[in-house]
């Protein structure tokens, strides 16, 4: 009897021990018993369960074992913390709950289950690097963007966004987003005041834009663009925009790239622009017409010149209005009239006076008599003047103009003269550069020789047509190195300095003109008049 009772007592003790061991065992949370972790932003009800690999489990228990109890803390510093509910689930579906607090300075604190004790996490490596703490990186997510024409959404397609962000552990994580197609309206641009652009919460570091004419398949623009206000082509049509975007922000910890493509239908009203609003006598005005369907419909009403010509420039048009010493100072109204639509566009330009110098010139009476006579003037009218009546419709040149020779500036553009004490009725139509006989004279730019011969008045003379009505003239040359009809290149030797024709000594008389209207060469070469005061400085 006693033996049976002993056996029963021992059995009960074993059962209690086994039960206690079982209770203990199923409440163990370690690397071997951990099944999953639920990481949920505090206040959210949808669980986010993660199964951890061995490395992540080690990081988790390393962080939890580093908890250091705070001594009666004032918890006001947790007021603006980002709070997560972290629940550990073991193989017996028992749970162990924590509240994890992330502060702005990246310090991490914790509370266990419902205990009010606050702990500082000395080793926050798990919380810095684990999946599930996405709210910490909301400012590092994909850029949110919309393509708008003013306030109207525009259709576009985007390639895959390759995106990376840096977590608090210093490691970069990929967060790629698949390609998308946003289906809405095609952008139809009918006014230059309409703004086509992206709205973004993250400004890209680099934005490269290509605009392709869909009809001709030609590239009409390629370069850096302001994504918030994309440019329009200079002419109407249907275009494909290809926009490549790159982000890189080490400070805020994100980087990535993507590209978008979309269609833009451009149908803008005709516009006109002037190269300047104020001209000095001797300067040439350039007018530009854009988005004109038929240039033959456009008539320019103006009082600056007797005839005006449009030249095609890509898909647009430009024309020139030269001024010289005969142009009266004042305000001129240019009115662009469309004979088809009946629209008129007025633009004002002001011409201001220039103080032209007076030159006293002494010349051998024999030279004057032999070069300034009826035969000389008749030849000049019959040979020289007509050489500047016809010009190529397209420019021969693409580079800036250069000075034809170096030396001393003896005479400025527009100077009036007293020859042998008697005033003349004409003004100097170019500049005189004093240089040694035989000094090289080069073409100021690409063009075609339209005159290369000796004339009584101007001596050995060359005229080059540079296209679109622009000519350069070289007079009193010693020898000629080119013939009429040949094409010359910028900087090519065409002659040498001499003193032929009506001349007092070796020099180059150089003129620029728009057809027969002579203009200040300095504006073509340097963007300002060539004077005796600035000549040496400009030559540098």
Image (tube, rainbow, N blue to C red):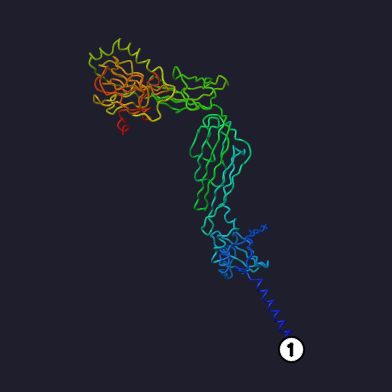
175 or 423: which is nearer to us? 175
Quarter occupied by the C terminus: top left
Q: Residues within 10 Å of mark 1 (few under 14, many from 20)?
A: few
On the image, the x and y values in percent for residue 482 come to 31, 22
Q: Is residue 451 above or below residue 65?
A: above
Q: Residue at (29%, 18%) from the top-left corner?
A: 460
Q: How many tags in the picture?
A: 1
On the image, the x and y values in percent for residue 380 come to 33, 14
Q: Is residue 466 above or below residue 370?
A: below
Q: Quadrant of residue 281?
A: top left
173 or 325: which is nearer to us? 173
Instruction: Name the residue that disc number 1 marks.
Output: 3
Assign a secondary structure to mark 1.
Answer: helix
418 or 405: which is nearer to us? 405
Quarter occupied by the N terminus: bottom right
Q: Quadrant of residue 85?
A: bottom right
On the image, the x and y values in percent for residue 279 come to 42, 26
Q: From the viewer's perspective, is 440 left or right of 20? A: left
Q: From the viewer's perspective, is 516 left or right of 480? A: right
Q: From the viewer's perspective, is 73 left or right of 511? A: right
On the image, the x and y values in percent for residue 190 come to 58, 31
Q: Quadrant of residue 432?
A: top left
Q: From the viewer's perspective, is 377 left or right of 103? A: left
Q: Residue at (54%, 55%) from the top-left corner?
A: 173
Q: Residue furthest right?
A: 1
Q: Residue furthest bottom?
A: 2
């Amino acid at each position: 009897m006693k033996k049976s009772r002993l056996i029963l007592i021992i059995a009960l003790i074993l059962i209690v021990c086994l039960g206690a061991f079982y209770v203990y065992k199923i409440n163990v949370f370690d690397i071997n018993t951990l099944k999953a972790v639920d990481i949920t932003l505090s206040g959210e009800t949808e669980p986010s369960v993660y199964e951890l690999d061995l490395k992540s489990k080690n990081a988790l228990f390393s962080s939890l074992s580093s908890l250091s109890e705070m001594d009666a803390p004032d918890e006001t510093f947790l007021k603006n913390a980002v709070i997560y509910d972290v629940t550990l689930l073991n193989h017996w579906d028992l749970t162990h709950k924590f509240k994890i607090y992330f502060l702005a300075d990246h310090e991490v604190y914790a509370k266990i289950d419902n205990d009010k004790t606050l702990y500082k996490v000395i080793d926050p490596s798990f919380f810095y690097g684990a999946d599930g703490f996405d709210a910490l990186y909301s400012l590092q997510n994909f850029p949110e963007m919309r393509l708008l024409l003013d306030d109207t959404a525009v259709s576009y397609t985007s390639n895959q966004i390759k995106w990376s962000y840096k977590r608090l552990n210093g490691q970069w994580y990929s967060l790629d987003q698949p390609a998308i197609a946003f289906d809405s309206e095609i952008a139809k641009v009918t006014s230059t005041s309409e703004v086509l652009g992206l709205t973004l919460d993250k400004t890209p570091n680099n934005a490269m834009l290509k605009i392709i004419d869909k009809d001709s398949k030609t590239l009409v623009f390629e370069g850096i663009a302001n994504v918030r206000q994309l440019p329009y082509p200079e002419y109407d049509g249907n275009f494909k925009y290809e926009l490549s975007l790159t982000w890189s922000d080490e400070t805020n910890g994100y980087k990535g790239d993507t590209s978008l493509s979309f269609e833009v239908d451009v149908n803008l009203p005709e516009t006109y622009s002037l190269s300047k609003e104020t001209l000095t006598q001797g300067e040439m005005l350039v007018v530009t017409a854009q988005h004109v369907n038929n240039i033959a419909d456009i008539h320019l009403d103006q009082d600056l010149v007797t005839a005006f010509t449009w030249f095609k420039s890509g898909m647009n048009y430009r024309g020139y209005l030269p001024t010289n010493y005969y142009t009266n100072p004042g305000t001129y109204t240019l009115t662009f009239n469309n004979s088809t639509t009946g629209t008129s566009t007025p633009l004002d330009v002001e011409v201001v006076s220039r103080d032209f110098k007076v030159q006293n010139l002494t010349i051998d009476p024999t030279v004057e008599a032999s070069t300034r006579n009826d035969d000389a003037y008749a030849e000049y009218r019959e040979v020289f003047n007509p050489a500047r009546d016809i010009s190529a419709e397209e420019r021969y040149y693409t580079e800036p103009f250069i000075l034809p020779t170096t030396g001393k500036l003896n005479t400025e553009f527009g100077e009036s003269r007293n020859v042998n004490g008697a005033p003349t009725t004409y003004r100097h139509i170019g500049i005189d550069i004093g240089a040694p006989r035989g000094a090289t004279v080069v073409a100021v730019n690409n063009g075609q020789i339209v005159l290369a011969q000796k004339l009584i008045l101007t001596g050995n003379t060359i005229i080059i047509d540079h296209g679109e009505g622009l000519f350069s003239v070289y007079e009193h040359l010693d020898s000629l190195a080119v013939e009429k009809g040949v094409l010359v290149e910028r900087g090519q030797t065409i002659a040498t300095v001499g003193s032929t024709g009506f001349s007092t000594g070796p020099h180059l008389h150089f003129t620029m003109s728009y057809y027969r209207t002579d203009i200040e060469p300095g504006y073509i070469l340097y963007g300002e008049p060539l004077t005796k005061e600035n000549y040496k400085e400009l030559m540098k």
